[in-house]
């Protein structure tokens, strides 16, 4: 079955450490996205990518970095510069993009806890 | 500023009763509107969208939504709720700045609780 795989499901890190969240899709979608979800705040866009080797900052990119070396993969690195990294992180993709009228397909998320 | 609002944090409904989850939006030009559902510790799943055409849009799992341009609303409805419909529902609107990259704006979500 086609879909988006995020790993790991749960991730624990000490403050000051960088951590990379994996996102892989086999839907042959061009556009990929990273969102952060916090209780009561909905989803906020971190980064998005329309094509390989190109990506754009979203609304809350500070303290995060991404790469898009392959169409299937869009890993997110949460750096030590991110002031409040504990959150639920969602990766998504869409057939058309970015943000055209085709719906987003989401992975099942990675819950990151930093202590 | 372009925005989307879900005025209710939680909606409670008895199984078998009709349900409505409200969404209003503010966007220039013609809006693209979406509803997504999220089950606990999972990603969001697409339910339905309005791009153009018929104001009543039918989607997955028996849900439908009505686009009302004069009231700038896109409420999600279902004639008969199921306990399995209990989840977090998000409304989203695509920004419409014309020519620039137009991002999706998500509402803060409405928790639907269906009592047996």
Image: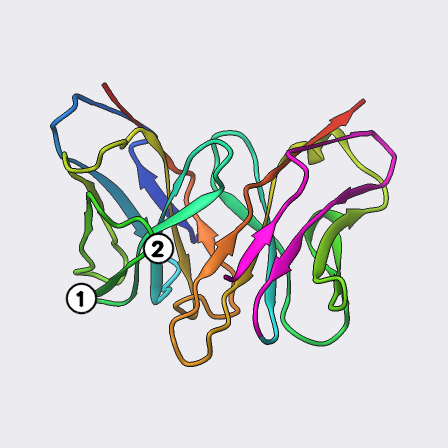
Indicate whether A111 appears above or below B99.
above
Relative to residue B50, is residue B92 drawn left or right? left
Q: Which quadrant is home to the C terminus of chain A? A: top left
- Nearest to the observer: residue A77 or residue A15: A15
Say which chain tag 1 marks: A
Measure how far apart labels 1 and 2 are at the Cα level.
14 Å
Residue B63 visible to the viewer: no
Indicate whether A98 appears above or below A32.
below
Give the secondary structure at mark 2.
strand
The x and y percentages for residue A109 are 39, 38
Indicate whether A33 appears above or below B95.
above
Q: In percent of the image, x 39 and y 67: which residue is there?
A: A98
Give the secondary structure at mark 1.
loop
The x and y percentages for residue B58 are 74, 60
The x and y percentages for residue A67 are 18, 55
Inspect the magenta stretch and tell me whether residue A29 lies in it.
no
Inspect the magenta stretch and tell me whether residue B22 lies in it.
yes
Question: Closer to the N terminus: mark 1 or mark 2?
Answer: 2
Indicate whether B22 appears above or below A78.
below
Give the residue furthest to the front: B1
Q: In percent of the image, x 77 and y 34: which residue is there?
A: B82
Relative to residue B76, is residue B109 drawn left or right? left
The x and y percentages for residue A20 are 19, 39
- Nearest to the observer: residue B49 or residue A46: A46
- The answer to whether mark 1 and mark 2 are in CB contact below 8 A is no
Q: Which mark is residue A33?
A: 2
Q: Which residues are magenta?
A: B1-28
């Amino acid at each position: 079955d086609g879909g988006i795989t995020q790993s790991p499901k749960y991730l624990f890190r000490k403050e000051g450490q960088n951590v990379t969240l994996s996102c892989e899709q086999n839907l042959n979608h061009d556009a990929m996205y990273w969102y952060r979800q916090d209780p009561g705040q909905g989803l906020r866009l971190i980064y998005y990518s329309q094509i390989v080797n190109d990506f754009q900052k979203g609304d809350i990119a500070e303290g995060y970095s991404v790469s898009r070396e392959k169409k299937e993969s869009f890993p997110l690195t949460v750096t030590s510069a991110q002031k409040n990294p504990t959150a639920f992180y969602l990766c998504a993709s869409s057939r058309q993009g970015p943000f055209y009228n085709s719906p987003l397909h989401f992975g099942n998320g990675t819950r990151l806890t930093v202590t | 500023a372009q925005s989307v609002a879900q005025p209710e944090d939680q909606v409670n409904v008895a199984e078998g009763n009709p349900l409505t989850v409200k969404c209003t939006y503010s966007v220039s030009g013609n809006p693209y509107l979406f509803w997504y559902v999220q089950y606990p510790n999972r990603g969001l799943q697409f339910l339905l969208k309005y791009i153009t055409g018929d104001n009543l849009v039918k989607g997955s799992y028996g849900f439908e939504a009505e686009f009302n341009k004069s009231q700038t609303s896109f409420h999600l409805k279902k004639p008969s709720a199921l306990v399995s419909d209990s989840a977090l529902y998000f409304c989203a609107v695509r920004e419409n700045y014309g020519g620039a990259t137009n991002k999706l704006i998500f509402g803060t979500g409405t928790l639907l609780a269906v009592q047996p």
